[in-house]
Image: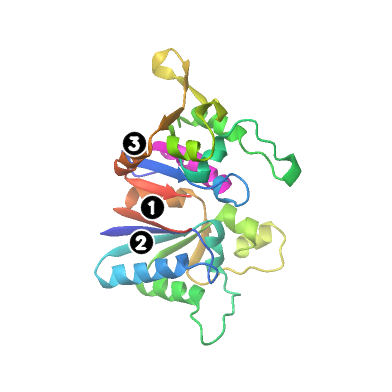
Amino acid sequence: MSEEGVVKKFLYLNRKAPYGTVYALESLEVVLIAAAFDQDVSLAFVDDGVYQILKDKNTSGINMKDFSPTYNALGDYDITKLYVEKESLLERGLSEDDLMDIVYEDEDDDWAEKPSVRVVSRAEMAELMETQDVVFSF
Amino acid sequence: MKFGIMVNEGPYQHQASDSAYLFAKTAIEKGHEVFRVFFYHDGVNNGTRLASPPQDDRNVTQRWSDLAKEHNIDLVVCVAAALRRGLLDENEAKRHGKSGDNIADGFRISGLGQLIEAGIQADRLVVFGD
């Protein structure tokens, strides 16, 4: 499907709240399509983007489908690196405990369940971006 | 250098498409290659030929069509984003039982795979958005 053998580092940078605008949902659509291309994929959640993987969301009052179950399925697409910026959480009165428990099964470790979410500092996030070939900002 | 471009905002409401156009035009003038522009989110609205801006304003869609024709640039509109927002080509209009299509010259509707492919093939993929 893609250029034979080319593997680039793709980062999907999510900066917006999950509802209110369509960016988060349409970002997730890109991520799922991208999984078919066998690239090295990471997701990052910064600013209001951290709300995207908040647990126990309820969208019934706004007539929007809650698409957060899709984040739980990312492991099945071999997308196992979800970086969340610590400062963005703190600025919003949130902690790691408020985030969804997104896990993947590690095929190299007898399919042990491991957490996909990694909380990193703002400085570490900057370093992560520096190592990427392609950054999609949503 | 070989550039891919992504445009994430609609015309007139937001400067993203203007900036992307000026970037593409300048890059080409400086001897670089722009092989694909991918329109996503409200960016798909850059591809409607029904837009009729005032005579004394720039015509955002026409500018893209002209640039694409002159320099053989692939203007791709995301199908899922386009259908949601009422941007259709002849095939999609027929498939969804709509009375007409509205895609402009030089634009084509395709899937998100075209965006990922652009990221793989380009030396740099530049995102214009909010």
Cα separation between marks 1 and 2: 8 Å
**Residue B60 appears in the figure:** yes
Give the magenta-colored segment's residue range: A25-44
Question: Can you identify the residue that label 3 sits on?
Answer: A124
> Is the residue under label 3 in contact with that under label 2 (CB below 8 Å)?
no
- Give the camera-side residue of B92 and B3: B3
| Residue B51 placement (x, y as % from top left) | 59, 75
Percent of width and height locating residue A106: 43, 19
Mark 2 Cα shell of 10 Å, populated few (<14), some (14-19), many (≥20): some
Q: Is residue A43 magenta?
A: yes
Instruction: Residue B118: give its label.
Output: 1
Structure colour scheme: rainbow
- The label on residue B42 is none
- Which of pointers 1 and 2 lies earlier in the amino acid sequence? 2
Quarter occupied by residue B53: bottom right
Residue at (67%, 57%) from the top-left corner?
Answer: B95
Q: Chain of mark 3?
A: A
Q: Nearer the viewer, mark 2 or mark 3?
A: 3
Residue B51 within the segment the image draws in magenta: no
Residue where numbered disc 2 is placed: B35
For mark 1, does the 10 Å Cα neighbourhood hold few (<14), some (14 to 19), or many (20 or more) residues? many
* Residue located 53% across and 48% down the image: A16
Task: Tell whether A75 sits left or right of A58.
Answer: left
